[in-house]
Image (tube, rainbow, N blue to C red):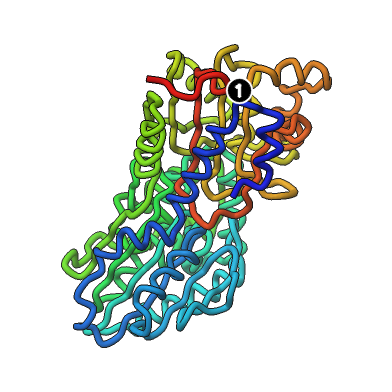
Amino acid sequence: MIKNRKKLIKDFPDSRLFLDVAEEALKFLSPENLIKNSFKKIDDLKKYKNIYVIGAGKATYGMAKEINKLLKNRITEGFINVPSAITKKIGKIIVNKTGHPFPDKNGLKGTQEILKIAEKADKNDLVICLISGGGSAMLTAPIAPLSLKDKVEITKQLLKTTATIHEINTVRKHLSQIKGGNLATKIMPADLIALYISDVKNDDLDIIASGPTVLDKSTSKDALNILKKYGIKNQNAEKVLAVNETPKSINNKKVKNYVIGSSVVALKHLQKFLQKKKYSVEIFPDFLEGEAKLMPKKLFKIANQKNKIYLFGGETVVKIIGKGFGGRNQELALSAINEIPETAKLMTLATDGVDGISPVPVAGAIITPTLKKLCQQKKLNIEKHLQNNDSYSALKNLDALIYTGHSGTNVGDIVVVSNINLTKRKRVV
């Protein structure tokens, strides 16, 4: 699962347990596994005339694959937008490859097909909606006069700021025909079961993929204030926000939303996984937030107890000021080199296997105190790389990167910090 596992173990002899944790996380979080474990939520299928499957996101392909396997010939029709299409169809579910992190024309066309299915569903039908991280970019249906080009430009500007995912998706919801509960209203009067794999703090359903099937707590005024906060101006967006609002009521008897996978679920599983190996473990599910390069100091301040492993979940942000390659996991890892105590080790992991933008997909990195000396030997200026947002080049030079490729899932990021000598001591009571 980790493509360079042997090389990492050779270069970092005490990294084996970290890599085991990473692989266990990705195995547990596979969409197929999460769907299989949650299938009991979908019952009494005989009463439905038609069953439609729709959705979007990084993990949605795997989710749809398992749903098709479990429902067999009961699916009438389906359509999903995903970042990587392994096949063009899964049974009767059409698979459409779309852009991410920015919306594209394929995403727009696919979203129109999803809306057609939603509006086709009748009172005797069931719609199963499969949503996961990345769905915001893949479900794109801007409200006129806003264009796709406008939507892309606004998204790019927001991603260059330190705006949180809650702020970004608040804007996205109020500029869309499908987000912020709009999809649920279009599916009525059919029954709707939405299965979400969460990549946001507190598993806020209205924020995951901008909550297409969930009542929106925010307003168009909130969205406008966020644009103003970050100095983003767009006349078409302002026109839309002046006259449109997201739905504020949904028939809860007809709509059922479930979170089947999340950072909390993942960290609890990993805690049990490590406890079975007799390690002392503490978890912090929503700890990772704010600027990535400022996070290491906070992590090491908490993760200071000897003979203990700490697991952190969430998502930081990167303020783009340079032109280099990297992502939040890589920037956090590179920043940690100058902060890491002599007794600590750290691993970062993007559960989708794709951290930021780099020549090849990077999942994360391993950091140990030995890298300080290696930076000196290689005359590698960490601060210079951080200023150029070029964490990828620095970590590649240090052979510290973790490669998994696209994992097919996404519950945000995981950081593991250990103060245990994992080379000499295998079991801790």
Look at the numbered disc 1 and give the secondary structure of its residue: helix
- 23 sits left or right of 43 in the view: right
Q: Is residue 241 something that shows in the picture?
A: no
Q: Is residue 131 something that shows in the picture?
A: yes
Q: Nearer the viewer, residue 350 or 242?
A: 350
Residue 24 place in picture, x, y as percent: 47, 44
Residue ID at (34%, 46%): 203
Q: Which of 415 and 317 is in front in this view?
A: 415
Q: Nearer the viewer, residue 279 or 335?
A: 279
Tell how many labels: 1
Residue ID at (46%, 32%): 288
Quadrant the C terminus occupies = top left
* Residue that sits furthest to the left in the current view: 253
- Label 1 neighbour load within 10 Å: few <14, some 14-19, many 20+: many
Residue 223 place in picture, x, y as percent: 42, 49
Residue ID at (59%, 58%): 100
Displayed quadrant of residue 382: top right
Q: Which amino acid does label 1 sit on?
A: Ala
- 62 sits left or right of 161 in the view: left
Residue 171 place in picture, x, y as percent: 45, 52
Residue 104 place in picture, x, y as percent: 61, 66
Residue to which mark 1 is pinned: 336
